[in-house]
Amino acid sequence: MNEHVESSERAEVILGELALSGRVAVADLAERLGASEMTIRRDLEALEAQDCLRRVRGGAVAVAGRGAALPFATRRRLGWETKQRLAARVAALVGDRETLVLDNGTTCLAVAERLAGRPLTVVPLSLHAATVLGERTGVRLILPGGEVEPVELAFRGSRAVESVRALHVDVAVISGCAADPAHGITSTTLDDADLKRAAIAAAGRTVLVVEGDKLARTATFPVAPVTDVDTLVTTHDADPAALAAYREGGVDVVLV
């Protein structure tokens, strides 16, 4: 990257690092992004104004704390065009009249937009996706029930896990906070990890959809190993070594 990289792209990298480590340093970000330290400081100032982080001497810390997921609205606007490309490819992998569990998160919300109106049976793991799918005829919606997380509107808790675990569906579409091949799919919260694991167990095949940089990340709570994934849909900028590890695990890799 260089000084001409869009500020939104730099913001995505900064917030991604904060979500996993809880702290970023100006010097490290400048080196990684190929930008000046002054540019990085301006980025941090802009993100602080949006309540996405808190600036400290030499860098910034996450408002929510180490390992916490960023706010849904923040994540939704970051890399939205990339998520649309990923979503289009995932939607093409789902056949009409199939049944599927659709994960929570902003990437899967983009998938929901692509699936809306098609003859499918969908179990969405968030009310955001359920709303998008329910606004048009075609999709048969089945909600898992249980507690709903405020703002994120993701289902969570034992009732949601048990209801998903009792299903038999054709495909689970899973997104993730991190998917380093050595550690598999991992999540920033225990509830999210449990529900993702139940969705994978209920499905005949699993499609993992993540941006390329998440293949170099590991979060706190394990979800599933690489071998539980049938198809990985990711971006061209993913680490070649990570892609090779997925392929060696028998995963079909699709790049967009």
Image (spheres, grey):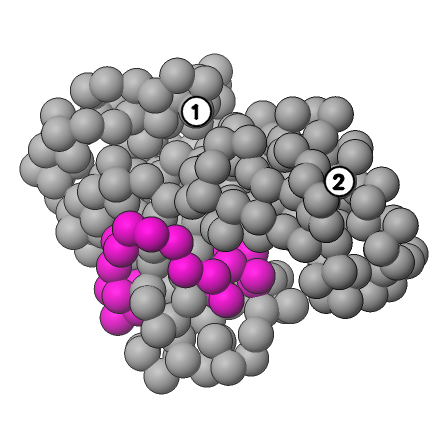
Residue 184: x %, y % from top left: 33, 64
Q: Is residue 211 magenta?
A: yes
Q: Is residue 152 above or below residue 226?
A: above
Residue 53 bears which disc, if any?
Answer: none
Residue 227: x %, y % from top left: 26, 70
What distance separates the C-alpha of mark 1 from that of mark 2? 24 Å
Query: Could you classify mark 2 by the number of other residues whose Cα lies within 10 Å: few (under 14), some (14-19), or many (20 or more)?
Result: many
- Residue identifier under label 1: 152
Q: Can residue 184 be seen in this view?
A: yes
Q: Can residue 79 be seen in this view?
A: no
Amino acid type of disc 2? Leu
Q: Is residue 241 above or below residue 124?
A: below
Start and end of the magenta stretch?
Answer: 209-229
Query: Could you classify mark 1 by the number of other residues whose Cα lies within 10 Å: few (under 14), some (14-19), or many (20 or more)?
Result: some
**Left-right relation of 98 to 164:** right
Q: Disc 1 on helix, strand or loop?
A: loop
Q: In this view, does 139 lie above or below 207?
A: above
Residue 205: x %, y % from top left: 26, 57
- Residue identifier under label 2: 44
- Mark 1 or 2, nearer chain start: 2
Q: Disc 2 on helix, strand or loop?
A: helix
Q: Is residue 190 magenta?
A: no
